Image: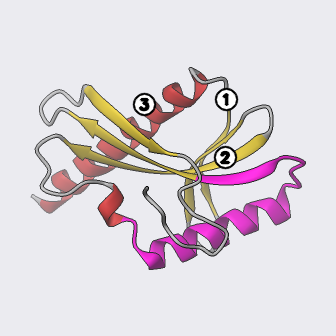
Amino acid sequence: MKLDRDFEIRERGKLGEQYVCEYLRSRGCEIKAVNYSSRFGEIDIIAENEVRIIFVEVKTRTKESMTGGFESITPSKIRKFTKTVADYLMKNKAAKQPRIDCAQVIVDGGSNALVKIDYIKNAVEQAGEYSPL
């Protein structure tokens, strides 16, 4: 049942985004947009704090997954993401310094309860390279 599995994956992804929104709010951020789309791709979360506008890529996995979410962020995905960020900034003039972050959400496979969030600030440098460390 591929359709059921695809639906389950999409729903788990939405839940992961909700968990990251809560995480960001608890750290003083205001959520400006969720699932912003352009012709280049999608930004999962756009948030702001006092000094930054933050663009977040969220990857959600179950604790039983063989690979982590960060591993799925490819150079191609980074190029699409940064083009989408540039598109957003051109259409929405921001006075704040932009930053690109990545979040890996781990949930329980049965209940989808949050297990943990791994969050990398400034994960993509200006050169467009992913830097998980």
Q: Residue at (17%, 27%) from the top-left corner?
A: 111
Residue 38 spot, x, y in % from top left: 65, 67
Mark sitting on residue 29: 1
Q: Is residue 69 magenta?
A: no
Callout in the foreground (2, 3)? 2
Q: Which residue is mark 3?
A: 19
Left or right of residue 40: residue 112: left
Identify whether 86 is placed above or below 47.
below
Dot 2 amino acid type: Ile
Would you say the magenta stretch is mainly helix, strand or loop?
Answer: helix
Residue lying farthest top?
26
| 51 to the left or right of 93 | left
The part of the chain drawn in magenta is 73-100
Residue drawn at the location 56% of the way across and 63% of the way down: 124
Depth check: give the residue in front, 103 or 120: 120
Image point 9% across, 58% down: which residue? 1
Residue type, label 1: Cys
Question: Tag 3, which secondary structure?
Answer: helix
Coloration of the structure image: secondary structure
- Along the line of sight, which residue is nearer the eye, 40 or 50? 50
Res 54 label: 2
Horizontal and vertical percent position of residue 74:
40, 73
Which comes before the other along the chain, label 2 or label 3? 3
